[in-house]
Amino acid sequence: MEEMTNFIIEAIDKDLKDGVYDHVQTRFPPEPNGYLHIGHVKAINIDFSMAEKYNGTCNLRLDDTNPTKEDTEYVDSIMEDIRWLGFKWDKVLYASDYFPIIHACAIKLIEKGKAYVCELTPDQIREYRGTLYQPGKESPYRNRSVEENLDLFRRMTAGEFETGAMVLRAKIDMASGNLNMRDPIIYRVLKAHHHRTGDQWCVYPMYDFAHPISDAAEGVTHSLCSLEFEDHRPLYDWVLKECEFKTPSRQIEFARLNLNYTLTSKRKCLKLVKDGIVDGWDDPRMSTICGMRRRGYPAEALIDFVNRVGVSKAHSVVDYSLLEACVRENLNQNAPRAMAVFHPLKVTIENYPEHTSEMLEVELNPNDPAAGKKQISFSRNICIEQDDFMEVPVKGYKRLTPDNEVRLKGAYFIKVKEIIKDAEGKVCELICTYDPASKGGNSPDGRKVKGTIQWVDANHYQPATVHMYQPLFLTSNPSGEDGETDIMENLNPNSLTVLENCMVDADLASAEPGKTFQFMRNGYFTVDSYAKPEHLVFNLTVTLKDSFKV
């Protein structure tokens, strides 16, 4: 079978063939200002898999150049997510590791006449920058002498000026057709405590300046990033050229992953958390990696998903049902089976011996013979789903009715003898009989039944709470076409339904958080991260069939 390729692989192959590089080194450079989401899975997979393909290395480098938004909590979560996805970095590095080098590069640019200290306000800088159709206007501070710029930058670094008082700008071309090249800011005064360097610095580099220098200083050969940085590549190359790096890194862009019915903006996700719309960054309705892990999405399924989406230069929106299909396929092969009743209806099997029970053997996973079997208890008193009985059946109904015998999964055939109702006329109990000869679900006389239903022994079960989920948003694009729609307008009020007093197989009492089961005929469910033995909670991972809707 021919090995798959893409434009990134083709570019790396050419660089190696032409002798531009003799090895491959990549990096994954997230900013620790929030939790990673499904879009990051694509970037992580590309960065690490490219290094692996060429027997190279991939570092985790935290882009900690903005201390006002960054925290060690996010650093820890990023590391946990990458490990969970199954990737191993060569080194853990930080942009702050390179602050002395980056600062020295800024001084070099000043000395070369390629950078100057500017005192325009942020609004004035935007005004002077011009538009896509009009050239920018030079700052009145653009032609300061090298000596004056060096002195001002030294004083900025020493903390003599307040936050926002002045910035250091690259001196490039105010008439460039690329707005990123119109004297971009490369350093700003920012008196803020840094989570690693403390109060050592009063000036911090901008991302577009720190990133290429960090890449080159680190030895990164191929800087793989999402497509929004394509317009920044000329600046990336300019910085490396003017800072005189002998072996500059090469930036290659790919289209980011856009998934409908999800929100990946860290700012907007933070609003959901702070406003209590969700119960944290790891809420199973969130598109964060930790949220998907809590919901029970296997790491292998997420990698399978991004591999199916592929690598391209074209913007596209992927349907959420593809992600669910990957999750469903994985769990169908790997999740053990169990039985659960969410809305119990009491059933008394009149002709079954009183004060006794038996253990029945059922397969843990019919798709995995190696999984073996388990035993479940059966007695005179069981519970079935309320929906699995209909006194006056509709056309096509194949489950339990006054005239319709059904099979209890892995147990016996039963049929209704008597219906008991409460004071309001609602069915509250069924008196049934069973066929002792139908043990295991087959009758020796060869008669057929059309319905098979799940059940739980009412004398031997594990109580549980079940969280049922729908998409968090009512529309496929929660932020609107312009990205400015108030996400609160599109919230789905039915995104979470909590089912109390559910019943599951008794052996699930020992199920550990994160363990996923297929509840027969209901779907795949995962023990919640915060579940306790005395209060078992299951989260719906995915339904048995594609039912993605709002």
Image: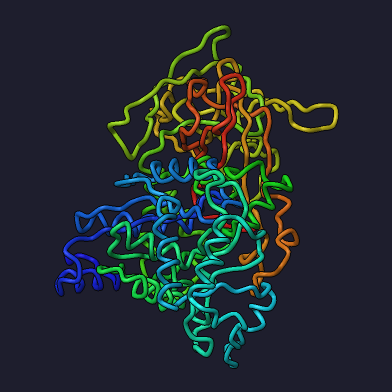
- Evaluate whether residue 252 shows in this view: no
Q: Position of residue 132 (x, y in %)?
A: 57, 88
Where is residue 243 shown, x and y percent of the image? Answer: 36, 70
Query: Picture quarter containing residue 262?
Result: bottom right
Compare residues 44 and 517 and report the one nearer the observer: 44
Q: Nearer the viewer, residue 7 or 91?
A: 91
Q: Residue furthest front?
A: 147
Instruction: Give the residue at x 31% y 67%.
Output: 249
Residue 247: image location, x then y, percent:
25, 68
Screen quadrant of the C terminus: bottom right
Q: How is the image coloured?
A: rainbow
185 up-or-down from 295: above or below: below
User: Residue at image x 26%, y 53%?
Assistant: 57
Drawn side of residue 41 relative to residue 380, left or right:
left
User: As displayed, is residue 166 above or below residue 504?
Assistant: below
Can the viewer see residue 491 in this picture? yes
Name the residue located 42 percent from the left edge and 44 percent from the top edge: 298
